[in-house]
Amino acid sequence: MGFTPIFQFSIIPVFRSLVMLIDSHAHLEMPEFRKDLSEVLQRAKDSGIGYIFTVGTERKDWRRALEIAGSHPSVYAILGVHPHNAREIDEKTYPALKELCKHEKVKAYGEIGLDFFRNHSPRDVQLKRFREQIALAKELRLPIVVHDREAHQETLEILKSEKAGENGGIIHCFSGDEEMAKACIDMGFYISIPGSITYKNAERFREIVKSLPLETLLVETDAPFLTPVPFRGKRNEPSYVRYTAEKVAEIKKVSFEKVAEVTTENALRVYRLKV
Ligand code: NI
C-alpha cells in the first residue's frame, strides 16, 4: 500500500473503518465460533465489515445459521447441502430447505457442487444432487453458491447444461483456471476470492485474478478455514477479509478503497441486497 510499517498500526485502521467490505462467505454456525461469536462480530464491525454471509452446509447447521442471521442485522444466511454431505440427502431434505429458505434473511442457495478431492460422498451421488439443487435454487429464485474442488470440467458442464446462472451466482473459493473463470463470468457468475490468495505458492491464482475485471470479483473468508497471511495457521474470521482485499488491490494495482467499493457493490448486487 506504500505506507511504512509504523503507519499500519496507527493510521490505517482508522482510515479503513470508513470503507465497507463484505465477507461474502463464512461459516459462523460452525463449532469454532460457539464460544466467542459476539467478539468475532464486533471485530468484524470494527474492521469495516458491513455484512457477512454465513453458509449452513448441512441439516444440523441450517437453523443455527438462520438464528445468527435472524439476531444480527449485519448477517445474512445461505442454505443448502454441501457436496461432502450429498449422501445424506433424503426425502425430507428438500421440503425442509424449501421452508427455511422462505426466511427473509436467506439470500442464496448453497454451497452446492462437486468435491472430487475429498470424495466424502460418492461422485455419482454428488453429480445427481448438484443438478437437483440447482433446480431447487431456481424454483426458489435464489442465486447459487458453487463449491468446486478438483472437479472443474464436470462443474462447468453442469452449470452450463442446467443454465445455473439464470438467477446469478458465485463460484466460491475459486480454484479453476482463467478459461474457467471467464466461462463462469459469461454465464452470470461472480468469482469469489478467499484468503489463500495471500499464500506464497498462490502465484498462478494471483495471475488469474490479475486478468479478471474487478467488477466480477467478491472477497470472502470461508471462515473458520483458509486464514490469510499474516494469521495463517490460526482460526479465520470475517475481520480478516481485509487482508484478502488488500492483496487483490496489490495484484490489480488499484487502491484498497476501490477494491472495497467495487466488491461491496458486486456482493450487494448478486445477493440482491437493498441498503
Ligand atoms: Ni464454505
Image (spheres, grey):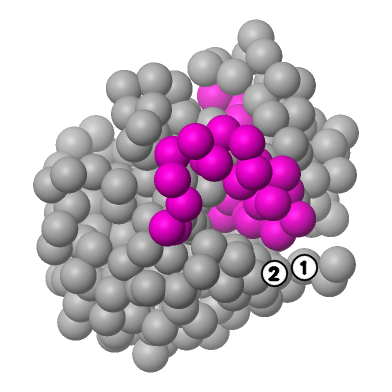
Q: Determine the residue positioned at 36% across, 32% down.
A: 230
Q: Please say if 261 is above or below 9.
A: below
Place of residue 224 in the rendered image (x, y in percent of width and height, measured from the top left): 46, 29
Q: Determine the residue positioned at 71% across, 59% down.
A: 19
Q: Earlier in the sequence, mark 2 or mark 1?
A: 2
Q: Amino acid at mark 1?
A: Leu
Q: Which residues are magenta?
A: 1-30
Give the structural element (helix, strand or loop) at label 1: loop
Within 8 Å of ligand 1, the CB of disc 2?
Answer: no
- The residue tagged 2 is 268
Nearest the viewer among 244 and 220 is 244
Which quadrant of the rendered structure holds the N terminus?
bottom left
Place of residue 162 in the rendered image (x, y in percent of width and height, measured from the top left): 39, 79
Give the structural element (helix, strand or loop) at label 2: helix
Place of residue 28 in the rendered image (x, y in percent of width and height, measured from the top left): 61, 31
Q: Please say if 23 is above or below 65.
A: below
Q: Please say if 243 is above or below 24.
A: above
Is residue 10 covered in magenta? yes
Please give the count of numbered marks on the rendered protein: 2
Nearest the viewer among 98 and 238 is 238
User: Going by the image, does 47 lie left or right of 201?
Assistant: right
Report crowding for label 1: few under 14, some 14 to 19, many 20 or more residues within 10 A (C-alpha): few
Q: Determine the residue positioned at 67% across, 14% down.
A: 36
Given contact means CB atoms under 8 Å apart, are the residues at marks 2 and 1 in contact?
A: yes
Work out whether residue 249 can be spotted. yes
Q: Determine the residue positioned at 64% across, 70% down.
A: 261
- The residue tagged 1 is 273
